[in-house]
Amino acid sequence: MVGETLATKFVSMGHKVKMGSRTANNEKATAWASKNGGLASHGTFADAAIFGEIVFNCTSGQVSLEALQLAGRENLQGKILVDVANPLDFSKGMPPSLTVCNTDSLGEVIQRQFIDVKVVKTLNTMNCLLMTNPGALKDPGNVFICGNDDSAKAEVESLLRSFGWEKIIDLGDISAARGTEQLLPVWVRLMGKLGTAMFNFSIVQ
Ligand SMILES: NC(=O)c1ccc[n+]([C@@H]2O[C@H](COP(=O)([O-])OP(=O)(O)OC[C@H]3O[C@@H](n4cnc5c(N)ncnc54)[C@H](OP(=O)(O)O)[C@@H]3O)[C@@H](O)[C@H]2O)c1
């Protein structure tokens, strides 16, 4: 869902996008590519990692490391990896718990395992329809960003601005992913309470 939403938005903005999956002939990826014209293509995770100047991790948090290993360390080396995933565990039903939290986070685990990759964590604290369309809310609220590499964050910030995001808060290095990932239990509760996924966190001072 997230991968398709982001990929469709990027194609609509004139970017070339390759959707990766475990197999080269994934049914959903094939359907997405054939529906989205010449800028859209699909392949394996490795094909996508080779193709992308910027790579997005939109896999389930519990399998993100597996997917990134399939993408290939050598194919990701030196690139920006935008991590949108959350380490949610639904195995005991709702509400989900986090598989990693408090003194660590998925963003940090990925950064530690892929030290040559510039991991930037962002957009994980909102529904995907809002990620690419902040104008859907009268007051879109804030989007958080964190990561160890300032120039990588600046590049991702400009992508966020191209979606229409204005209130971007840089929380610092990748360890700030602990905080943004831990917002998810609150986010899930709020969705139940509000009866919609179209809301966001807004910081007031
Ligand atoms: N949904 C949202 O609005 C939203 C918002 C913020 C953050 N997120 C986070 O973004 C991520 C994606 O969410 P989503 O809603 O798009 O989930 P989704 O629709 O279930 O997509 C998950 C993706 O992970 C892949 N996958 C599953 N098992 C895998 C494995 N063992 N190895 C490699 N890939 C595997 C799936 O591939 P197949 O299709 O081939 O099974 C699918 O492409 C999650 O981490 C979620 O927490 C979601």
Image (cartoon, rainbow, N blue to C red):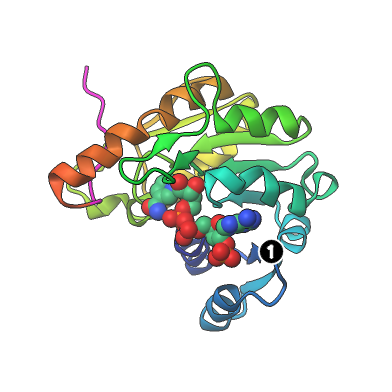
Q: Quadrant of the N terminus?
A: bottom left
**Residue 74 colored magenta?**
no
Left or right, 65 with reference to 202: right
Q: Nearer the viewer, residue 122 or 187?
A: 187
Q: How many marks?
A: 1
Name the residue: 49% across, 22% down.
176
For residue 153, above or below residue 47: above
The stretch of residues the image draws in magenta is 197-205
Question: Badge 1: few (under 14), some or many (20 or more) residues near its Cα, within 10 Å?
Answer: some
> Which of the 4 quarters of the picture holds residue 194?
top left
Name which residue type carries label 1.
Answer: Arg
Dominant secondary-structure state across the stretch colored magenta: loop
**Residue 204 colored magenta?**
yes
Residue 87 rendering spot, x and y as whole percentages: 50, 38
Name the residue: 72% across, 73% down.
24
Q: Nearer the viewer, residue 127 or 168?
A: 127
Q: Quadrant of the C terminus?
A: top left
Left or right, 76 with reference to 111: right
